[in-house]
Amino acid sequence: MEEKIIEGLEILWNIFVLSLLVITFSLLIISIVPSFLACISVVRQLKEKKVSNLDINVIAFWGNFKSYFWKGVIVQLFGAVVLVVAYINFQLIIQSNNSIEKFIVITVTITFLIITLMFLLNLMYGITIKHVNVKLLEHNLLLVFAKLPIVLLLSLCYLLFFVTAFLLPQVLILTVGLLILIHYKTGSKIWEQFDQV
């Protein structure tokens, strides 16, 4: 009984520490995705027993952060470009008088945004297990559709996280860590056949 309590407290402590690290390293807007990648990688290392619970600290996180910084920045910039293009598209279509054209363009844009979001979220886990190359991007795109329910669940978790962070920023310290754990769990289910380190 005591072991389960201690294990539960360790998990809560890890969630707290991981959340604190992600929030701290995300203060620079450009480093949001790199800090999530570093955190996912630390969780993977914990799961694979490459680090112990006592090693979840700034040093382990910092090493992963440096390792994934530029890859994360590229993913984040790609996501930002997609959002800007979608915003411009919405602004242009609002000025159109043809309601059928509006409906088609809005539907296509929203579908494109959802698929891109799922692609990028799935790619974030894939980056932590494989070298980034064309094959990784191909596998990622195929996995988005092959494991669609799990990828949709991950996307909904991120949407729920952003809504919660906007409405209740005081619980951010817990929700970030939980989101990372959910991302790790869903990512490992999606990438299980490729998840060989």
Image: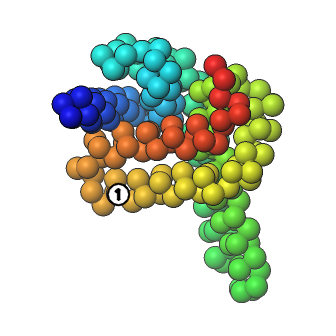
Screen quadrant of the C terminus: top right
* x and y, in percent, of residue 176 in the image: 37, 42
* x and y, in percent, of residue 12 in the image: 27, 36
- Point 42% across, 44% down: residue: 179
Count the labels in the image: 1
In the image, taking residue 7 as reference, residue 126 lies left or right, namely: right
Q: Quadrant of residue 110?
A: bottom right
Front residue of 40/30: it is 40
Q: Quadrant of residue 103?
A: bottom right
Q: Is residue 172 above or below residue 134?
A: below
Screen quadrant of the N terminus: top left
Front residue of 84/139: it is 139
Residue with the most extreme front position: 1
Front residue of 62/8: it is 8
Q: Is residue 92 above or below residue 126?
A: below
Front residue of 197/56: it is 197
- Point 60% across, 57% down: residue: 152
In the image, taking residue 46 as reference, residue 70 lies left or right, namely: right
Instruction: Tell me if residue 97 can be seen.
Output: yes
Residue with the most extreme left position: 2
* x and y, in percent, of residue 100 in the image: 76, 85
Question: What scheme was used to colour the molecule?
Answer: rainbow
In the image, taking residue 158 as reference, residue 117 lies left or right, namely: right
Q: Quadrant of residue 55?
A: top left
Q: Which amino acid type corresponds to the residue marked 1 in the rendered image?
A: Thr
Q: Is residue 151 above or below residue 42?
A: below
- Point 63% across, 26% down: residue: 129
Instruction: Tell me if residue 89 can be seen.
Output: no
* x and y, in percent, of residue 96 in the image: 71, 80
Q: Under tag 1, what secondary structure?
A: helix
Mark 1, residue position: 164
